Amino acid sequence: MGQGTEVKTREDPKVEIQEKGEVFFFYRPKVDKEEAHGPDDVQRMYVVLRPESVPDRAVEEKQAPDSGKEGKKRKTRHGGDEKGQADGGNEGGHGKEEVNVEEKPLLRLIVMGKKSLPDPAKHGRPFWGYVDLVTTDIEDIKDALKGAEYDTATRGKRRQSAARAMGEGVYRILKHEGRGGRPHTHLVYKLELPSRGGEEGAVGEPQEAMNVEPEASFLVQIKNPEQRGGGRGGGGGGGFGGLQGKRKAAFPEHLQGRFGSNRYAPADPPDLLNYEGCELLLISASDDVEEELGLELQTETEEETERGAGGDGGEGGRAGAGCSDLVKMFGEVADVKPLLSGSWD
């Protein structure tokens, strides 16, 4: 569906677009559950970001391709054993590789510790998450989302169901100069699927349960991997667990320098998110991006509708499903019913 467009609705909103792209939301049922019928049946929530180019920024810096889970998966594909892949979560991203996102896909798989996004009505409460996988190979993300069976010493064979897709849209990472002149970064998004069917503000049951609103804005802060302690995310039910040992990201010197002696720093540049083991906090800012930031996001379907190609809300939703990038990339491994219908399994 593409990265959509944005329109500044105020003369000087003091907003700089750092990154734009597509965002996909998934959840996975708990082990040995074939279906999820409510939030208590959910094992994990995933957010996948696929950056696309902005003016003067087609090249992103990411971890070295032989580091982290990305490196383990690459070794497995090129003759390594399956055990190597299974043990691949014991180190974070490190090193450096440059990727032109106009020529090659770049994808980040983020795990939310609370199994939901922050509640937009509860401003200021941080929700912890971490970057679990960074890759330029779509097959790596598909492998992370698919179902699997595995043996355990105490419970025998267990079944992990495939992930369910529940949202697709466009996102921006913005640098915003707020009151007092101190810059911070926002992650903002707007959903394209599931279709709202013409009802303003409507979301489906799984989306509502996990706070995936039709659009939202979050402050995003990156945790300094060289600082100890949970910090702001340590309480308040934000799902802050913290990564241990080698699983934390090891940023190159110029990115580590963005923290100084601080425990957290803005996601500036967004390259910080291109390292597995990067820990982050999302803090709810608003569910009305235009009112807060003077920026209106438009999805590809909305643009087509304005040009007279999308029809009414229902037709637009069906057309969107037919050209969904999520369905094209991950539909063979992830159940898309919650994405298209807005309902549980």
Image: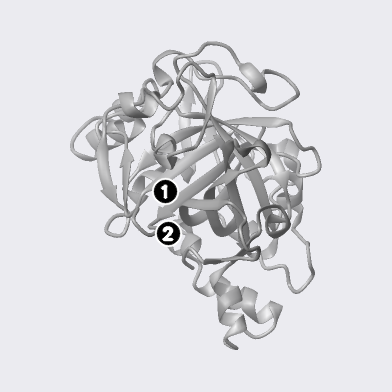
Where residue 30 appears, as percent x and y from the top left, is 63, 35
Residues 313 and 34: in front is 313
Which disc number belongs to residue 312? none
Point out which mark residue 329 bears. 2
Tell me which residue sits at (27%, 47%) in the image: 99
Check disc 2: other Cα within 10 Å, few if <14, some if 14-19, many if 20+: some
User: Are the two marked residues, 2 and 1, in contact with CB atoms closer than 8 angstroms?
Assistant: yes
Q: Which residue is mark 1?
A: 142
Task: Answer left or right for 83 relative to 198.
Answer: left
Residue type (three-letter) at the residue carrying disc 2: Met
Q: Earlier in the sequence, mark 2 or mark 1?
A: 1
Residue located 29% across and 55% down the image: 104
99 w.r.t. 309: above or below: above
Q: Quadrant of residue 186?
A: top right
Determine the CA span between mark 2 and mark 1: 8 Å
Report helix, strand or loop for mark 2. Answer: helix
Question: Could you say where residue 302 lies in the image, as x and y percent from the top left?
Answer: 61, 74
